[in-house]
């Protein structure tokens, strides 16, 4: 998508003398409201034609059209669109424009708020200037959302060039007393960028130094997505903690250099975080989980595939929450409506190998239920919810899942062996607000072709039974693989028992292709 549509811009003179039709004192607001809700349903050509009706319509429609440019079409690749974008952002290019063109070019640049440059790869036949990132960040003066995930041009050289250019601009602003670009304002000697959301996931070339430069510069960021970065570590998290005062969402999943030290530093300084995703951070353990009570606004927590987290961490968290409540009640501090982890709505905790209980006890799950009482969405692996079958086990399941008063959706991952389906039915009966149970069943060649397995319990002592009867009677149960027929049967039983719970079968292929 070109930033300068020559045809439409040249036609502006055709309505330069046309006055806007008077519709009343509040006509501007009504027209703006009307256009903003209508043009999203029109084609690009129709939108451009609508811009030519009059000047006022042009000024209303142009920012909407160019707010989030999309790259790539049937006649242009993403690479060609990216190259065209940069050619229109070069500072020297402004000198070849006429005055009117300069004005409208600046309008278009100022209209862009969201830019996605993800997964743009190198082109063997063309080079990109190392200053490309500087052009984007300084010329697009109202840019709030920038997605650079997987972009191969995000390198240490481009970050270094941006930092150098910024230092030169800072020097000039000290001399002239103001920022040369009105969209980027300076406070003292520091320039503030309007960027609020940044995604640099899978930018493998970035070093720790480059990451620190990024998070020291864009201090208005509230959403940071930095997944799968080898250079992301505790020192970078400390930089984030010190500079990003508005941080609400942080995703550093699959960053192996992050440990409890960095997470604890983040928790202690950035208490307004609402969405924290640290999946597959192998250095994170119970030490971080036990400190989550310091994030009273936290709503979403993703700890999936963290290999060092156990149920003990949630039990420690619950103890800390109770101590915090006691301290608040006995001190002169004003009481808060929400304390600890009361705001957490979603816990993503599947594929945590140590997040499992002993063979006959489910006390670990109680720690989650008590520390996060308002949780509505929960993911766990099979080993975190399944026990050896017995009547005492069924009673224990009932007592544990009754603690989840607000749970609405439960996902059970990695069901890769024969299980006792009655346990899942008991969960559906016990959790008072539960609406859906998603069964993530491993679907490999053996299961798809129904090949028998040594996991099957084929001894003479095993017997078939009805699930609803086994809830209250001590009958030897037979473990079976979960299939669609089992799900259908569970749903039928829920209907008979007048429970509004729906079981969903989802095949899960564990092979990464």
Image (spheres, rainbow, N blue to C red):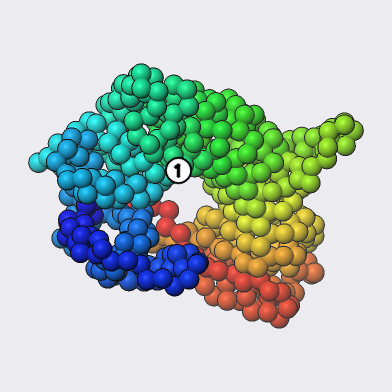
Residue extending farthest to the right is 330
Q: Is residue 418 above or below residue 148?
A: below
Q: Is residue 17 above or below residue 103?
A: below
Q: Which secondary structure lies at badge 1?
A: strand
Does residue 434 appear to the left or right of 146 in the view shown?
right
Does residue 457 appear to the left or right of 498 in the view shown?
left
Instruction: Tell me where residue 94 appears, x and y as whole percent.
Output: 20, 39
Instruction: Tell me where residue 501 appears, x and y as whole percent.
Output: 66, 71
Q: Which residue does the image show at 33% across and 42% down from the upper left?
A: 140
Q: Which residue does the image show at 48% across and 32% down from the upper left?
A: 219
Q: Quadrant of the N terminus?
A: bottom left
Residue extending farthest to the bottom is 496
Which of the pair 152/175 is nearer the observer? 175
- For the residue carrying disc 1, how many other residues have a C-alpha within 10 Å: few (<14), some (14-19), or many (20+)? many
Q: Residue 128, can we see it?
A: no
Which of the pair 158/87 is nearer the observer? 87
Does residue 444 appear to the left or right of 500 in the view shown?
left
Residue extending farthest to the left is 125
Task: Kindly indicate the quadrant of the structure image that contains residue 194.
Answer: top left
Instruction: Tell me where residue 164 appears, x and y as whole percent.
Output: 30, 22
Q: Which residue does the image show at 77% across and 38% down from the upper left?
A: 321
Q: Which residue does the image show at 34% across and 30% down from the upper left?
A: 180
Q: Residue 11, can we see it?
A: yes
The image shows a total of numbered marks equal to 1
Task: Kindly indicate the quadrant of the structure image that contains residue 39.
Answer: bottom left
Instruction: Tell me where residue 66 appears, x and y as whole percent.
Output: 32, 55
Which of the pair 281/452 is nearer the observer? 281
* Residue identifier under label 1: 197
């Amino acid at each position: 998508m070109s930033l300068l549509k020559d045809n439409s811009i040249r036609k502006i003179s055709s309505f330069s003398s046309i006055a806007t039709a008077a519709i009343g004192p509040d006509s501007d607001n009504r027209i703006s409201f009307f256009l903003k809700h209508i043009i999203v349903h029109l084609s690009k050509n129709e939108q451009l034609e609508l811009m030519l009706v009059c000047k006022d319509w042009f000024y209303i429609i142009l920012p909407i059209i160019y707010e989030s440019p999309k790259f790539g079409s049937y006649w242009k690749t993403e690479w060609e669109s990216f190259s065209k974008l940069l050619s229109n952002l070069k500072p020297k290019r402004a000198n070849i424009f006429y005055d009117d063109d300069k004005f409208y070019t600046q309008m278009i640049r100022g209209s862009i708020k969201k830019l996605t440059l993800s997964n743009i790869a190198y082109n063997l036949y063309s080079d990109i200037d190392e200053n490309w990132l500087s052009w984007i960040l300084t010329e697009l003066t109202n840019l709030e959302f920038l997605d650079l995930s997987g972009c191969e041009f995000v390198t240490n050289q481009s970050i270094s060039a941006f930092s150098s250019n910024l230092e030169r601009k800072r020097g000039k602003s000290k001399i002239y007393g103001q920022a040369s670009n009105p969209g980027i304002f300076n406070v003292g000697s520091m320039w503030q960028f309007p960027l609020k959301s940044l995604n640099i996931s899978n930018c493998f070339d970035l070093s720790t130094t480059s990451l620190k430069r990024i998070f020291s510069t864009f201090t208005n960021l509230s959403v940071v997505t930095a997944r799968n970065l080898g250079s992301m570590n505790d020192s970078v998290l400390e930089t984030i903690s010190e500079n990003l005062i508005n941080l609400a969402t942080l995703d550093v999943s699959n960053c192996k250099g992050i440990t409890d030290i960095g997470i604890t530093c983040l928790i202690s300084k950035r208490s307004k975080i609402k969405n924290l995703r640290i999946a597959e951070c192998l250095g994170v353990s119970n030490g971080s989980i036990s400190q989550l009570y310091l994030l009273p606004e936290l709503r979403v927590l993703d700890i999936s595939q963290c290999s060092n987290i156990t149920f003990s961490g949630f039990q420690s968290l619950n103890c800390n929450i109770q101590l915090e409540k006691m301290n608040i009640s006995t001190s002169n501090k004003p009481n808060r409506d929400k304390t600890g982890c009361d705001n957490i709505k979603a816990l993503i905790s599947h594929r945590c190998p140590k997040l499992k209980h002993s063979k006959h006890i489910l006390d670990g799950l109680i720690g989650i239920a008590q520390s996060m009482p308002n949780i509505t969405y929960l993911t766990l692996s099979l080993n975190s919810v399944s026990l050896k079958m017995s009547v005492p086990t069924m009673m224990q399941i009932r007592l544990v899942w009754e603690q989840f008063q607000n749970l609405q959706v439960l996902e059970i991952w990695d069901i890769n062996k024969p299980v006792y389906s009655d346990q899942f039915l008991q969960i559906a009966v016990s959790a008072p607000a539960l609406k859906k149970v998603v069964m993530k069943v491993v679907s490999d060649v053996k299961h798809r072709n129904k090949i028998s397995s040594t996991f099957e319990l084929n001894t003479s002592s095993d017997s078939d039974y009805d699930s609803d009867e086994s809830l209250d009677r001590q009958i030897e149960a037979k473990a079976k693989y979960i299939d669609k027929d089992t799900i259908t049967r569970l749903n039928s039983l829920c209907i008979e028992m007048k429970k509004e719970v729906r079981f969903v079968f989802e095949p899960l292929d564990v092979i990464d292709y």
